Amino acid sequence: MKQKPFAKLVALSAFFLSSSALAAVEVGDNMTLQGKAGTSTRYDSNIFDQDKNPQGHFIQNMGGDVALTKEFKAGKATVGGGVEHEWYVDSPRDDRTNFNVMGDVEGRISQAVKAFLSAEYRQRHVNRGESLTDPTAVAKSPVRYWETSGRAGLEIRQAQWSIDPLVEITNLDFRNTRQLNGLTNTQDQRDRTEYEAGARIGYDIDAQWQVFNRTMGNWREYDKTVAGFVKRDSSGIESIVGVLFRPTENVRLEAGAGYLGQEYDAANLRDADTVAAMAQADWDISEDVNFLATYRRSIAEATAATHSFRLRDVVSTKLTYQAMEPLTLNGSVKFASDEYENATGVAAKERVDDLMTIGFGADYEVFKRIFLLAGYEYANNESNAATRDYATHVGRMGAEFRF
């Protein structure tokens, strides 16, 4: 008997819950427990310019997450984790389960120095781009990967100076995907370990103005060379000089520019050499309304053998409104532009993808700690590459218990 679609917990991934706050429950001396669990339905509809048979699917999801925090005299420690499972109601595509475990600790070493350390292990799935020229090449299984990451850093405050050194290590382990036609889509060439280290140094001119420099170096080491692909070992640097302006307690403005580069070991991969840029505006318009806008330029990895890298520019805005005590509304607009740099010897026109995403959502507390959830997201991608234009519509409804 076919199941009726209902269900999706957006605990780990839904965009319209990203601002939800959890009420912690005291479980011991200076110990608190918080989490959420729920279920809901998502409907995905893909409309491709080159696809004569667009399809929509109901996807059910359920899961939850939990975190336990212990406060000490000089800091606190947190351990936690979560799991979610989702499955297609009317499609032969595989089910998927995401989970994560994490821990972090932070504490004050002295009056001027604070330290933190965190680690996380998680399994994730991301949908692989559909083949628009061969309907049988649709992915039966999404791209599955394991991510292990760690972060360590200091926050040093001395008079007008702030120094924040940071080290991050991330290991990514991908699994090949299967298609409905039985063929395998290779993902092994993406396995890698990424290292990043650097610091942000700021100087407060006065209570409102700060100048800063943020310099981070990175090293990307790939595990193997797969037939038909090139090993993408590389090293790079991002250095930004900027200004932070706080005209009032409710407004924070930040902008900077500098150098962004990435050098690849493989002879047929072109190096990246461009301008780094970032900006952010965070404005508490009132006690109930917050507006956040960000811009960032970065160098992202490409997966096709014909491309060296992607130069990515992302602009995003989000408005959150606490309409009344039990109701929270939010909306977001995001624009991402990916410019693909061809590898040496590739004569094809360089690909450019422009993706616009618009979303809005709401959560309403119907009973104490029980919330109804709803959201909608529209995405439209325009590309100069053949068969890359598409639009997607995603609607979500569900319920969640928070503690």
Image: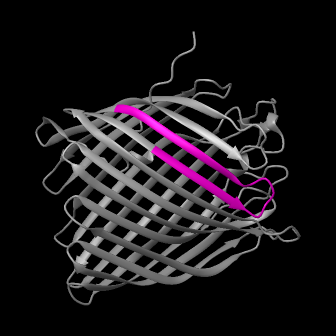
Segment tinted magenta in the rendering:
376-399
Q: Nearer the viewer, residue 304 or 164?
A: 304
Quadrant of the snapshot with the N terminus: top right
Give the quarter of the figure containing the C terminus: top left
Question: Which residue, as the protein is rendered here, is positioned at the far bottom?
Answer: 205
Of residues 187 and 47, which is closer to you in this image?
47
Residue closest to the far top? 1
The answer to whether residue 13 is visible is no
Q: In the picture shown, does residue 352 fall above or below 136?
A: below
Q: Position of residue 238 (x, y in %)?
A: 53, 76
- Magenta-colored segment: predominant secondary structure: strand
Along the horizontal axis of the image, is 262 left or right of 213?
right
Q: Is residue 61 magenta?
A: no
Q: Residue at x 54, y 41 (%)?
A: 124
Residue 393 in picture, x, y percent from top left: 57, 44
User: Left of 118 or right of it: where is 127?
Assistant: right
- Using the rendered image of the protein, determine whether residue 327 is visible from the camera's viewpoint: yes
Q: Position of residue 194 (x, y in %)?
A: 57, 59
The colour style of the image is: one colour
Residue 297 position by quadrant: bottom right
How far across and how far down the image is residue 72, in percent?
16, 50
Image position of 61 with respect to 51: above or below = above
| Residue at x-position 60% and y-position 73% | 236
64 left or right, relative to 365: right
